[in-house]
Image (cartoon, rainbow, N blue to C red):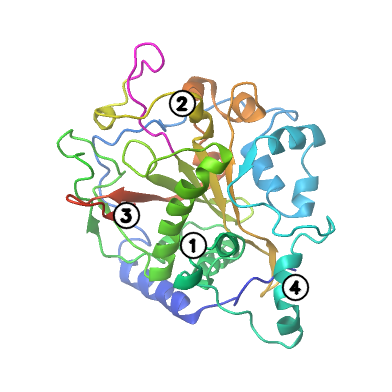
Amino acid sequence: MWNPSPSSSLPLKIAFILSFSLTASSSSYSPPTPNPRYHSISIPKVNSKKPSATTATAGDILALLGTPQQAASVDPQIAAELQSCFKFIVPFNPTTNTPPDSRFNLINRLSQSLTESGIRFPRRTLNSKPRRDAEGYQNELIWSPPAPVLEIARLAFDSGGDPGSIQGTLDPTMIYVPDCEGSNENRCELTRYPYGRHFINEELNSYMEFLFQLIAARGPKVGLIVSLNRFDFFHGHLFIAADGRVGILFHAKEYPAFDKKVFPYNMGYCQKGSNVTYDDSMNMRNILWLAPLPSDSTNAWSAPGVLVVLDAHPGGIIYRDIIPNYVKYARTIYEDDFGDNVVDVNYLNVGTAKPDYQLFIC
């Protein structure tokens, strides 16, 4: 089994219990009234027909990015077509020039002697400034995230996929969402609720910000060119899959500019002033992050973390089978196809004289 870092972090578990006790009088998670003008390209999904045995599903994507046993359960033809649509921002296999059955050799090589000695793996954090921008270390932060990220992955898995297991790790303090790049002037409500929250553990908040920054920085290598602004890339949907795995489905190109010829769709107040051009880049607007998958063993992990763009180009299997017909123009994959939606993660520039990006979990 793959064992990336310490299996537990007492402060986060204490924080979970504390947050639950603070919010138990109402519920484990009680968001405010939704914004009345909240409207995005990810329009509410309507019921669609049940896929056939030869139709790809979001579950097939998760299986192919999971354990070898899960991947083997996918029809070979569907697997091959889906894999052709995976554009990895961080390499999927964290090894190079190693046998196919040694998928986690890099992590194991670094830590085998420590494991045999009963010593815990070194704690990986975001605070190592000299290596923060090193490509190899960024890869490791995806394959094997800091301990607090592994904690919420384990909490969700051990709870049987209960959204409250993650919602309970949020600080109950509500944070007002201020104006973002002139959104108030246009009567635009970017977030589902007018208030957001943070995780109690600050390293979790930093990791969410790191994901946005890494996607924006590395995206061009796989054909994803995005800007961290309110028209393009600023949010993701955190979910728990049926097998208990935690993930975030990010959406870029959220408000393309209205154009009578190429994008004749009115997306509401938040679209006004958009400079996002509707073109082939829309095919790359769905970005999937998966936390490492816990195993049934207390200290073991079955699969490393993943960061991948899901190419939804017309003619491809994702476009054909997974994106509903009524929203193919937007290339939107829905988070509830992957699992239960837990919270939205927003990363907004609320600065005036200079950029000031802040996190709002709604």
Q: Dot 1 corresponds to which residue?
A: 133
Gap in angstroms between the C-alphas marked 3 and 4: 38 Å
Q: Between label 3 and label 4, give the one nearer the viewer.
A: 4
Could you classify mark 4 by the number of other residues whose Cα lies within 10 Å: few (under 14), some (14-19), or many (20 or more)? few
In the rendering, at what x and y percent does residue 179 appear? 19, 46
Amino acid tagged 1 = Asp
Amino acid tagged 2 = Ala
Tell me if residue 253 is in the magenta stretch: yes
Badge 2 vs badge 3, beta-carbon distance below 8 Å: no
Gap in angstroms between the C-alphas marked 4 and 2: 43 Å
* Element type where label 4 sits in the image: helix
Gap in angstroms between the C-alphas marked 1 and 3: 24 Å
* Element type where label 2 sits in the image: helix
Q: Nearer the viewer, residue 146 or 88?
A: 88
Q: Quadrant of residue 172?
A: bottom left
* Element type where label 3 sits in the image: strand
Badge 1 vs badge 3, beta-carbon distance below 8 Å: no
Q: Quadrant of residue 201?
A: bottom left
Q: Dot 2 corresponds to which residue?
A: 330
Residues drawn in magenta: 252-265
Gap in angstroms between the C-alphas marked 2 and 3: 25 Å
**Residue in the image at 71% along x and 83% along y:** 114
